[in-house]
């Protein structure tokens, strides 16, 4: 899985949507997929934030840790 797109880009896309551009047009303007712009806007409407969610986490095997 790749790195999340920057907050700067997210802010520009959301700002364009707030400025009256459609979500699809805002995505196209900044070179992100329409589904990404729509997802960011839906997330902002639902939670108030469009920051990237944490990725990864503890990758240790629970089976091995239980025996240790």
Image: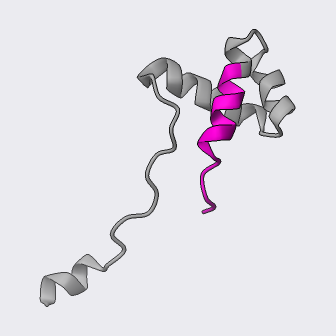
Q: 57 or 65, which is in the foreground?
A: 57
Q: Quadrant of the N terminus?
A: bottom right
Is 44 covered by the magenta stretch?
Answer: no
Residue 39: horizontal and vertical position, in percent?
61, 31
Kindly indicate the quadrant of the structure image that contains residue 18.
top right
Task: Give the quadrant of the C terminus.
Answer: bottom left
Q: Which segment is the magenta one? A: 1-15
Of residues 66 and 12, which is closer to you in this image? 12
Identified at 73% across, 11% down, the residue is: 19
Q: Which residue is drawn at 71% across and 28% down?
A: 13
Residue 47 x %, y %: 42, 24
In the figure, 7 relative to 64: above or below? above
Q: Which residue is drawn at 14% across and 89% down?
A: 67
- Residue positioned most to the front: 8
Residue 31 lies, in percent from the top left, at 83, 40
Horizontal side, residue 30 vs residue 60: left or right: right
């Amino acid at each position: 899985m790749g790195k999340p797109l920057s907050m700067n880009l997210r802010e520009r896309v959301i700002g364009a949507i707030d400025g009256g551009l459609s979500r699809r047009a805002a995505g196209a303007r900044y070179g992100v997929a329409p589904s990404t712009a729509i997802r960011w806007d839906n997330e902002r409407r639902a939670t108030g934030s469009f920051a990237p969610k944490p990725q990864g986490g503890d990758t240790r095997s629970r089976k091995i840790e239980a025996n240790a």
